[in-house]
Amino acid sequence: MFNKFFAKISEDIAIDLGTVNSLVYVRGRGIILNEPSVVALNEKTGQILAIGNEAEKMVGRTPAHIRAIRPLVRGVVSDFEVTEQMLKYFIEKAHKKKLIPFYLPRVIIGIPCGITEVERKAVSDAAKNAGARKVFLIEEPVAAAIGARLPIHEPKGNFIVDIGGGTAEVAVISLGGVVISKSLKIAGDKLNEDIVQYIEQKYKLLIGERTAEKIKIGIGQVLQVDKRKEAPVRGRNLVSGLPEEIIINSDDIQEAMEKSINQIIQAIKVAIEETPPELLADVMEDGIYLCGGGSLTRGLDVLIARETKMPVKIIEDPLTAVVRGGGIVLENVDILKEVLTRTEYQEPPK
């Protein structure tokens, strides 16, 4: 009885804990937070100076004793204590009531398919220490499929590709569960690194990853879909050591990202090969669904469609699909609790 009462009055939260950005959904209020997964840390004192938007402004601009870091790398926790502080910040910012035991929220967190049990436990423990009453995990492709309103509980194949900042997740879902899944440590961050290395090798110009991301968003493409675009890039010339500005074009970025994009497409092809024939027939009819920030890369949907010979669709608002899916589970937990990776979402017996 008390558990049901507290479940009604607590503001339960769904979190898309991303490598680059984290989004927070509060039951009954919707998405209320979208901030970078960055923490500014004073290494002399161990003090957290800023989290989220404020910390993101410090990246690449701090003195030696202050580090602006991402506590998640390739979708998994790399710094437990900093992740705990970041989650605490998100939970407190999302929660209107003071975090006292009666009002502590239940939290659902999206996780990559390919992480180990130890990595799952690290996420769960960090959230509990941050102030969650209960923590439940949901695989990101499943959450994204729910957010896209795909019929995952029907006996049919739903093929979804979630390309985020740290990982690319490929999954076939049927009857509420993952039938086939592939998880790659190749996604937005890796594409940024590819651009940095390409410009360094071809133009002998050193740029930062934030600059690379702006270039990727501004003129990046994986296929020639419209006019060739150009953009100025500023950095340090590795030969002279002096600042320099050059003009690069979308063909450069396409060439820089080609190898990583091909690896993502290869993972999609492998998943198709391993999909049972009956489910594959459904996918051939309904198509492949793309979500995550990487799905917005120009020409990616066209390229995947060409390589797989199947229709490809970018879902509506692909950046928020995972947290929207977690939010739908929060709002309909009695119906959708089977999609959570932890079965203890059942309330304890009275």
Image (tube, helix red, strand yellow):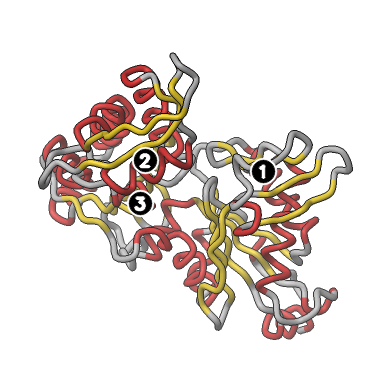
| Kind of residue at badge 1 | Ala
Q: Nearer the viewer, mark 1 or mark 2?
A: 1
| Residue positioned 45% across, 67% down in the render | 324
Asked whether 245 or 42 is in front, the reply is 245
Give the vertical position of 280 relative to 338 (above or below).
above
Between the C-alphas of marks 3 and 2, the distance is 7 Å
Q: Position of residue 299 (x, y in %)?
A: 18, 45
| Kind of residue at badge 2 | Ile
Q: Image check: 323 left or right of 212?
A: right
Give the vertical position of 301 relative to 93 (above or below).
above
Q: Nearer the viewer, mark 1 or mark 3?
A: 1
Secondary element under disc 1, as helix, strand or loop, is strand
Residue behind mark 2: 180
Between the C-alphas of marks 1 and 2, the distance is 37 Å
Q: Position of residue 187 (x, y in %)?
A: 41, 38
Secondary element under disc 2, as helix, strand or loop, is strand
Between the C-alphas of marks 1 and 3, the distance is 37 Å
Task: Evaluate if marks 1 and 2 touch, with contact meaning CB atoms under 8 Å apart.
Answer: no
Of pointers 1 and 2, the one earlier in the residue sequence: 1
Task: Evaluate if marks 3 and 2 touch, with contact meaning CB atoms under 8 Å apart.
Answer: no
Q: How busy is the neighbourhood of tag 2: few (under 14 within 10 Å), some, or many (20 plus)?
A: some
| Residue positioned 28% across, 42% down in the render | 231
Q: Image check: 35 left or right of 44?
A: left
Residue behind mark 3: 173
Residue behind mark 1: 68
Of pointers 3 and 2, the one earlier in the residue sequence: 3
| Residue positioned 22% across, 47% down in the render | 298
Q: Quadrant of the C terminus?
A: bottom right
Asked whether 1 or 31 is in front, the reply is 31
Q: How busy is the neighbourhood of tag 3: few (under 14 within 10 Å), some, or many (20 plus)?
A: many
| Kind of residue at badge 3 | Ile
